Amino acid sequence: MHLGLYGFGTRLGVDPSGSKQAILGTTLDAGDLFTDRVRLRPSAEIGLGDSVTTYVVNLELMFRFTVDSEPAVPYVAFGPALYSQEHCGTVTGIDCPAVWAQFALGFEIKLRGHMSWLLEYHGEDALRRHRFFIGLTTRRGP
């Protein structure tokens, strides 16, 4: 197990379900667990638009199907997410803060050196909400 800051990423996305928001997010590559293909990745997202600002903090366990040196690296991730929103509890039908089950499916496409494009789908709240992201991510070299 190797913990530390191995990389970070920024991403922009949309949430077409629910409140149809624009999403701004960031990720940290917090270490390898058992192998360099299993990673711990905390992240945070802010949803803007509609009438409510939303916040999601994730702790994902990511499995990468190939090594970092490949030109494209597909991955899958699972983990809990803490959801909240502006004026929590005043919007009917939404309980918050809430803990959600999180699922992510994506891939990185090498841009240059240790920098890659990130394309990602997030299924949140037991797949009741869907978010799509594009961004840039880095990975510290050996």
Image: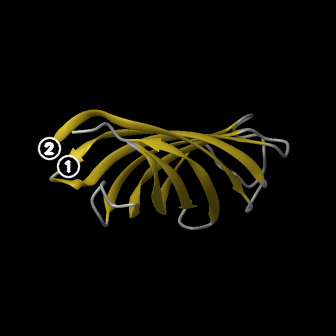
Kind of residue sitting beneath label 1: Leu
**SS state under label 1:** strand
- Residue shown at 17% from the left, 39% from the top: 2
Number of the label disc, if any, that sits on residue 131: none
Residue lying at the far front of the rendered structure: 112
Q: Position of residue 133 (x, y in %)?
A: 61, 54
Dot 2 falls on a residue whose secondary structure is loop
Q: Is residue 31 left or right of residue 94?
A: left
C-alpha distance separating marks 2 and 1: 5 Å
**How is colour applied across the structure in the image?**
secondary structure
Q: Quadrant of residue 52?
A: top right
> Image point 52% across, 53% down: which residue?
118
Where is residue 97? Give x, y as percent. Answer: 58, 42
Contact, CB < 8 Å: mark 2 with mark 1?
yes
Q: Quadrant of the C terminus?
A: top left
Q: Quadrant of the N terminus?
A: top left
Q: Which residue is mark 1?
A: 33
Mark 2 = which residue?
Answer: 1
Between 138 and 102, the one lying in front of the other is: 138
